[in-house]
Image (cartoon, rainbow, N blue to C red):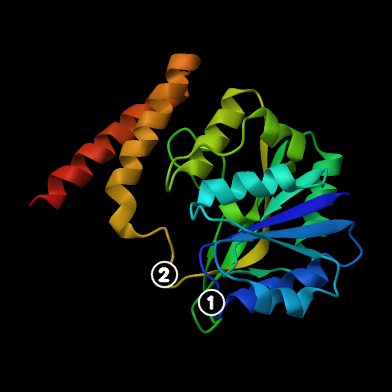
Amino acid sequence: MLLSVIVPVLRFDSYTQFALDSLVPALNGIDSEVIIVSTDDCNHLMSRYENSGLFRFLTVNINTLTYKLNLAIDSAQGYYIARFDSDDLCEPERFKVQLDFLKVTEYDFCFGDARVINTEGDLIGRKVSDSSSLDFKCDLIHPTMMCYRSVILKLGGYANIEYSEDYMLWLSAVSSGFSIGTINEPMISYRVHDSQMTSSNNLSPTFARNTSIKLYLLMKKFSFRLMGGFIYDFIKTFYARFFSRL
């Protein structure tokens, strides 16, 4: 099989069906599967997609993002792995574009841009994936990721670090000699709504985790750029915690 699309679901909501429906035309003609991992009962969705032969539903008891991601990767049969979120919309040509990109370049990971939409599906902006400042900040859009499954397995999958599991993986990949490429075209429509995991309330603990991640990687392999990123996050953590007490 060529491609496995992994979709961790925090909860089934009104956006889930639209998200999964958008994958069907995007995967047309590609030897692929979609692996959906959730703690919720998914019988209503299974009956909708059971005749497509495209979707696999895995129900688990552990409701953490990293567990769902790693389980999906372990269960995947594809040569490539692609990420997707259950509240976004997939661009029709996304997977063809990314597969062609990885085939003709030497990159191990591939990311794309995203249209930003609101709860009603209206366009409100655009996000750009950029790896040039990865040592300092994460400007890679996680649900646009595609990579070789063998590479993500060599890296040990996602570490169990809430809100920073993706950043840890990208930094570990670069530190281990793997390469990251970006495509400046929208791969998804990224939906912004109140129930998302990432929010401004998580900034201070996220800065602290990022500082710890960089210290850990520096102890394994020193890098001046990563040291600069460590100092940058350390200062951000201090200011975030100081001003939160005022």
In the rendered image, which quarter is residue 29 located in? bottom right
Q: Position of residue 39 (x, y in %)?
A: 55, 62
Q: Residue at x 68, y 61 (%)?
A: 187
Residue 211 drawn above or below residue 10: above
Disc 2 marks a residue whose amino acid type is Ser
- Residue that label 2 marks: 195
**Element type at marker 2?**
loop
Residue 66 drawn above or below residue 156: below
Q: Residue at x 43, y 15 (%)?
A: 219
Q: Position of residue 177 (x, y in %)?
A: 65, 23
Q: Position of residue 208 (x, y in %)?
A: 31, 38
Residue 51 drawn above or below residue 59: below
Residue 220 seen in render = yes
Structural distance between the alpha carbons of marks 2 and 1: 10 Å
Foreground mark, 2 or 1, reads 1
- 118 horizontally vs 210: left or right: right
* The residue positioned farthest toward the left in the image shown: 246
**Element type at marker 1?**
loop
Residue 140 seen in render = no
In terms of sequence position, does the residue under pointer 2 or pointer 1 come before the other?
A: 1
- Residue that label 1 marks: 13
Disc 1 marks a residue whose amino acid type is Asp
- 218 horizontally vs 95: left or right: left
Q: Residue at x 50, y 36 (%)?
A: 168
